[in-house]
Amino acid sequence: MKVPYGRQSIEREDIEAVVNVLTSDFLTQGPTVQKFEEEFAKAVGAKYAVAFCNATAALHVGFKVLNKDIKKKVLATPITFAASSNCVLFENGQVEFVDVDPKTFNIDLNKVEEILKKNPGAYQGIIPVDFAGLPVDTEELRKIADRYNLWIMEDACHAIGGGFYDSKNQFIKCGSGVYSELTVFSFHPVKHIATGEGGMVTTNDEKSYKHLLKLRSHGIERNAELFAEPSHGGWYHEMQELGYNYRMSDINAALGLSQLKRLSVNIENRQRIAQKYKEYLQGSPIKRQEYDEKKFLNGYHLFVIQIEKRKELYDFLKENDIYSQVHYLPVYKHPYYQQNGYADTKLAHAESFYSKALSLPMYHGMTDGELEHVLKTLKKYESR
Ligand SMILES: *Cc1c(COP(=O)(O)O)cnc(C)c1O
């Protein structure tokens, strides 16, 4: 029995949905992309959703839409996939990494405020990541951001289905845009919903929505009301700024739309698996993400533990055909970042986190047998 740390789950209805698109009039962006966007926006409680070819492209265009002044810095968490901060570097902007909270592994909001206090006016935005699926308290972050005139682009690639109760006791779904200008999701196969490759941005701001649409497709405008020049006729469209081809295809969207229907069972399964891990870890020296479980609903893309002898456990699991993974090396530790201005960055909690981090298997289609195998192997490891 081979157990990966994460994998997609494809069912017959997914295959049928994709096959149906193949015999339709549209292969690239068409009615299925639009339907996927509408259903996705509904699922997370946002006004608008824009689909992209992947979340990295979505982050890039998201940053372009929000960027106010490229000389002003963007705050980011180091415990994430590199794309979260790369999107700023694509535009030759500057990123400053902020240390993480040692309990939640999310960006430390107290540290964010300390940095802003020291140098107000030097920053323009922040890219928090809902790490492993645990939402950042964006209500608190919004207060800080408003004091220092920052935008928030929330990287929720781990956290579809997650959310938290705010101070008014309303449940804030990740992606609802109640406290963040833009929220970004990924449909890479290890994430909750697979489209092959794919990403989404959600927002409640109409102007940002239109700008995202335009940049996704070469910076070309087709709406006559928004032309800079008088129209030459029915064929006329104009390129108004430098954009990209970051479109999603209808083939990918059909898969996403079909997978989205199972989102709630997907989240329930992940909750159930997490519960088993938590029960197992009670009384074990192995640590996990700690947070107020009445306030936050963790979407559980990952189940991350902290263990002193991480490599030993990683190897032991592998010998037993369990393929755990490490998320993440602090982004600034990658050679590219080291060689480009981050050699002196040192964030104690992020580095300590990395030295002990391991992601245990967690995916929608995980069977009871697979979970049992992981739990038994952990027990075996701990009682050696
Ligand atoms: C997966 C992921 C991305 C990038 O997603 P792609 O769709 O593969 O481009 C960005 N940020 C985080 C936190 C991720 O986990």
Image (cartoon, grey):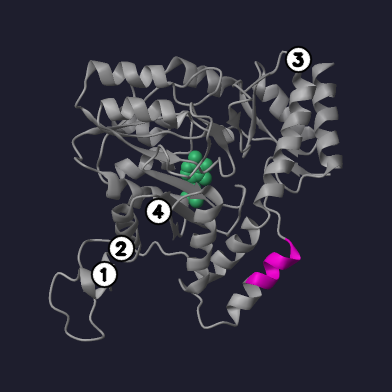
What residue range appears in magenta? 11-17
Inter-mark Cα distance, 4 to 3 = 41 Å
Identify the residue under disc 3.
Answer: 284
Q: Is residue 378 visible?
A: yes
Q: Is 8 on the left or on the right of 56, as rendered?
A: right
Q: Earlier in the sequence, mark 4 or mark 3?
A: 4
Q: Amino acid at mark 4?
A: Ala
Q: Are marks 4 and 3 in contact (CB under 8 Å)?
A: no
Identify the residue under disc 1.
Answer: 221
Q: Tell me the number on the disc at residue 214.
A: 2
Q: Is 33 on the left or on the right of 121, as rendered?
A: right
* Residue drawn 36% across the image and 43% down it: 181
Relative image position of residue 13 (x, y in whole percent): 72, 67
Q: Amino acid at mark 2?
A: Lys
* Residue drawn 39% across the image and 39% down it: 180
Inter-mark Cα distance, 2 to 1 = 6 Å
Q: Amino acid at mark 1?
A: Glu
Question: Looking at the image, is mark 4 or mark 1 nearer the viewer?
Answer: 1
Q: Are marks 4 and 1 in contact (CB under 8 Å)?
A: no
Q: Earlier in the sequence, mark 4 or mark 1?
A: 4
Inter-mark Cα distance, 4 to 1 = 19 Å
Secondary structure found at label 2? helix
Quadrant location of the C terminus in the rendered image:
top right
Compared with 290, 338 (above or below) is: below
Q: Are marks 2 and 4 in contact (CB under 8 Å)?
A: no
Q: Earlier in the sequence, mark 2 or mark 4?
A: 4
Inter-mark Cα distance, 3 to 1 = 58 Å
- Can you tell which quarter of the image residue 146 is in? top left
Mark 1: give few (<14), some (14-19) or many (20+) Cα within 10 Å.
Answer: many
Question: Looking at the image, is mark 3 or mark 1 nearer the viewer?
Answer: 1
